Amino acid sequence: MRFLLTNDDGIYAEGLRALQRELSQVAECLIVAPETEQSAVGHAITLSQPLMVRRVKREGHFWGYGVKGTPADCVKLGVKELSEKPFDLVVSGINRGANVGINVIYSGTVSAATEGTILGIPSIAVSLDDLTEEADFSFAARFAKKIALFIAKSNHTRGMTLNVNIPAIPEKEIQGIAVTEQGTARLMEDFEKRVDPRENTYYWLAGETLLPNMEKENSDATALKKGFISVTPIHYDLTRYESMTYLETTAKKLFP
C-alpha cells in the first residue's frame, strides 16, 4: 500500500512525524506538506504565484517534499506530480488541536483530506484535541494506523472523507469510538487590538471554540467532550437538498 501524508501545521510538525512513524510500518509513505504552518487556510489553492517545492531531509535522510503553498496544493502536487505511482490513501495530520463543528470549514487539515477525496482517493483527517506544545501524539498516531488500514481496505469509503478527532486524555480513559455528525461548535472570536511603533493599528485574532446551548447529542464536539474518539464522514458537496423542492417551486415566480 502507498499513503500520501500531509498536514497544515508544516512539514516539521511533531504530529506529522508521529503519523509517519506509525504508518510507515504498514505502508510506503510519501510526505508532501507545507513548508510553514498553514492553519485555517481552508481549501485555498495557489493561483497567482509559482509553487516552490524542495526536498526536505531529517537526520540526514530524505523526509519529504516541502511546498510553499497550502495543504490542498500539497495534495494536488503529491498526486499529480511528485509520485509516479498511485496512492491508496491520503492521511492529513495529526493536527495540533481539534477540528470540529463549523471550524471544519476553515481547517487546512480537513481540506487537505477533502482534496484527496476530490481526486478519487479515500482520505482521512486526524486531529488531537490538544493545542499545547507538550501534546503527546503517540496514541493518536496508533489509532490513525488502525483506521487507515480499515479505510484503505474498505470498498465503502470512496467519495468520503473521514474527519477523526481524538481526545487528549490517557488511553485508558477514552470511552470508545462515536460516529458523529458535524456539529455547530465554532470559534468565538476575540480580536486583540494593538498599535505598532508607527501608530498603525493592527489586530490579532484569538478565541475559544465553544459548544452552543442546543448542540446535538451526536455531534463531533459533544462526543469529543465526553471522551470519545469522534469519526465524522463528510463530503465536499455543499448542496442543501431539503431546500431544493421549496426553491424549485418559489423560484419560478422570479422569472419572467
Image (cartoon, helix red, strand yellow):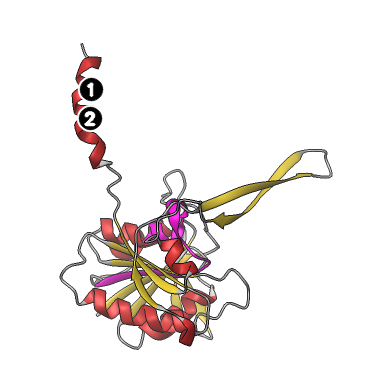
> In which quadrant will I find the C terminus?
top left
Give the image location of residue 16, x and y in percent.
47, 75
What residue sits 23% from the left and 22% below the top?
Answer: 250
Residue 118 forms part of the magenta stretch: no
Give the image location of residue 229, x and y in percent.
41, 73
What residue sits 52% from the left and 76% below the top?
Answer: 168
What number is the disc on residue 246?
A: 2
What residue sits 24% from the left and 28% below the top?
Answer: 247
In the image, which residues are magenta?
88-112
Residue 2 appears in view = yes
SS type, badge 2:
helix
Residue contact at pointers 1 and 2, CB within 8 angstroms: yes
Q: Which residue occupies the foreground of this view, 223 or 232? A: 223
Cα distance between the residues tagged 1 and 2: 6 Å
> In which quadrant will I find the N terminus?
bottom left
Residue 51 appears in view = no
Residue 100 forms part of the magenta stretch: yes
What number is the disc on residue 101?
A: none
Name above or below for residue 188 compared with residue 26. above
